[in-house]
Image: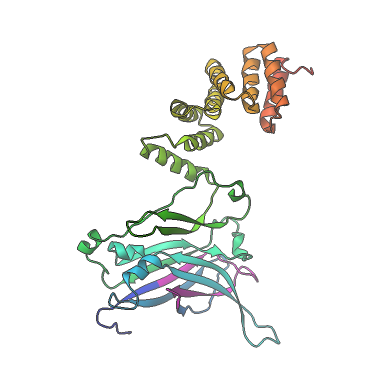
Amino acid sequence: MEQVPTGGRLVQITVTDGYDLKGYKGDTPVTFVRAEFNQVTLGDSAKITVSSEGTAKYNFTSSFEFNPEGGITLNDLAHNPVFLTVTEVLQKEKKQKDEKNLILGQAVVDLLPLLEGESSFEMVVPLHPVQGSPLETPRPGSKQCSLEVKVSVAEPLLTAAQVLGSNLLKVTLEGAYSVPESFVPTGTQQNYMVGLQVPSLGEKDYPILFKNGTLKGDHAEAKACYERTISFVLDASEMHFIFLRLGLIYLEEKEYEKAKKTYLQACKRSPSCLTWLGVGIACYRLEELMEAEDALSEANVLNNYNAEVWAYLALVCLKAGRQLEAEQAYKYTLKLKLKDEALLAEIHTVQEMVGFGNPSF
């Protein structure tokens, strides 16, 4: 067994299993894991064949020595994660001297729990595919490939008193708002890095980087984040966009009462055409036609060039049996070139049902 010098402690990283793996040459590739920390390779696992279910039993342990007196220090643990790279070993061709290896993906293990007094922890970390990797296309019925990892040290690196007296700053970035349209996920998920400038008492500011963030189109996760943000913030002067996004999610999920309440909150704090439009849509879907018309009229006062406002006014007038106003609102909807084809089709359906509202009848 390796001897640890006085003052040093061995930090062990064990990769037990890999899940939902596949390779360039099929679903049962031969693979190995390489562990790296602080720009040093800690070791390679044995070459393991992935099962037909996509599982690999690596049981691979690597380690490095933590020594506050020199070598790997607390700063190194705080700033550097462990990188785990999964590589496929391809069979040698007849004229080929050496095996050819192709990287499938890489996982990141954060060691911060060791600085919070933990002596061991386990986690399942996502394996991020490299560009062109077969892992970019998940196995049928699976989500994302991953590695199961255990990190341990014989005894905590910091005492309870040291943890309480530490100046470790931990920042979690949960959401990004008003991201460029080009960031919106339309195909394969991409990883992003976000940077923030943190004010310092010293001579300069220090940047904080958030690596391997995945931009997702997951409504449930986004909704939870927006709801949490609104519940935490008392001064909503800068929350206009968050109210709009949360209200839109509620509308898309047909939670019309919640949408109405959210948009009304925004109207009280920073009314705009879009906040009143949201109230109008929610009320219309709840069949509260009078409230819907009042809200849409407010939206129209703030911006009478919004085609969606005119479209919902047309629907309200159609349901209320007001032919002249329904036709006028419909004309403005077409003139302003409504882009929502589903909403336009809904107007046509209601027009046919009531027998008026379209001058071309």
Q: Residue furthest left?
A: 161
Q: Residue furthest front?
A: 203
Q: Residue 235, how many percent across, how many down?
A: 37, 35
Residue appearing at x 58%, y 66% in the figure: 130
Rendered view: 176 above or below 336: below
Front position in the image: 302 or 214: 302
Q: Residue 207, how many percent across, how many down?
A: 43, 59
Instruction: Locate residue 172 relative to residue 338 in the image: left or right.
Output: left
**Residue 176 lies in the magenta stretch:** no
**Residue 15 lies in the magenta stretch:** yes
The C terminus sits in image quarter = top right
Front position in the image: 313 or 27: 313
Q: Mark yes or no: residue 293 visible.
A: yes
Rendered view: 218 above or below 68: above
Residue appearing at x 56%, y 35% in the figure: 252
Q: Residue 216, how many percent across, how many down?
A: 54, 50
Residue appearing at x 62%, y 23% in the figure: 304
Instruction: Locate residue 90 relative to residue 43 in the image: left or right.
Output: right
Q: Quadrant of residue 91?
A: bottom right
Q: Residue 355, how many percent across, how many down?
A: 73, 15
The N terminus sits in image quarter = bottom left
Front position in the image: 145 or 323: 323
Q: From which residue to which does the magenta span run?
A: 14-41
Rendered view: 341 above or below 31: above
Rendered view: 32 above or below 231: below
Instruction: Locate residue 322 relative to residue 159 in the image: left or right.
Output: right
